[in-house]
Amino acid sequence: MPDAPIPDQWWLWLDSAHSPAINMSIDEQLLKTAQQAKRPVLRIYQWDRPAVSIGFVQAYDAATQTTYTIVRRPTGGGVVFHDCDLTYSVIIPVGHHIYALDRTESYREIHNAVKAAFGALGLNTTLTSAEIPKHVDRAFMQCFTTPTRYDVVADGKKFAGSAQRRTRDGILHQGSIDLNAAGGDRELLTKNLIEAFRSQLKIAFADFTISPDFLESAKKLSAKKYATEAWNIHRQTAEK
């Protein structure tokens, strides 16, 4: 019999709830240190308050829910409300086979795993082939009302979307999944998502250990960038 394929080695970080600014700074810090981590990271996390994240190029006024905390993501995409969703990030270092894929194919690779998680819930979803219509203003686009290529949909409803940023360090893929797909059961959806990543991408997970230096760097980045009006309203930052 042929030898079983060697599993892809990933880190798994089941994170707790943080402020919107800290959540975004952690993701950016993970991207900056992707080469040090040496393997991909799947981070699943929560928000410590109702929040709205807007895409990197979007207008601040795109976030119409003014009672929520608004934060600008380092990735693109549309407006996402973080009050009934499961959020996750995938960080892929340079040299990994997913990094070698083009943007749309890397979306497909990751969203196939998300699709499998829905399948375990008994939800028959597909990956859409639709592109963003030309008439849609990306500066004000709402993520879950505008399916884009390889988003996860069922019966015309979008259940999962994401956005990416690529740098010389790797890929940051930020995703949001409608928690209603699991009847609001965050624990069940988290379990299914991890298992779907493991089976679809042939992954062996190890727990990700966070150093005090990493957290301190993330807090400094939050104070300097993601917690500021200069970044969130005007998309300006003093960071070089």
Image (tube, rainbow, N blue to C red):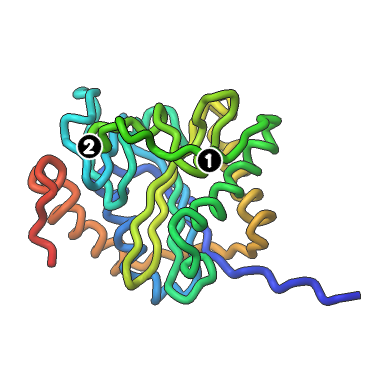
Q: Which residue is mark 1?
A: 129
Q: Which label belongs to residue 193?
A: none
Type of residue at label 2?
A: Ala
- Residue drawn at the location 22% of the way across and 24% of the way down: 64
**Of residues 48 and 204, the one drawn nearer to the viewer in this rendering:** 204
Q: Which residue is mark 2?
A: 139
Type of residue at label 1?
A: Ser
**Of residues 66 and 126, the one drawn nearer to the viewer in this rendering:** 126
Q: Earlier in the sequence, mark 2 or mark 1?
A: 1
Residue 49 visible in rendering: no
Query: Measured along the vertical axis of the image, is residue 181 above or below residue 40?
Result: above
Query: Measured along the vertical axis of the image, is residue 136 above or below residue 27?
Result: above
Mark 2: secondary structure: helix
Query: Residue reaching furthest right?
Result: 1
**Of residues 103 and 50, the one drawn nearer to the viewer in this rendering:** 103
Residue 59 spot, x, y in % from top left: 17, 36
- Residue drawn at the location 35% of the way across and 71% of the way down: 169
Please rate how many residues cluster around mark 2, counting C-alpha atoms within 10 Å: few if below 14, some from 14 to 19, many from 20: some
Residue 109 spot, x, y in % from top left: 56, 55
Callouts 2 and 1 close, C-beta under 8 Å: no
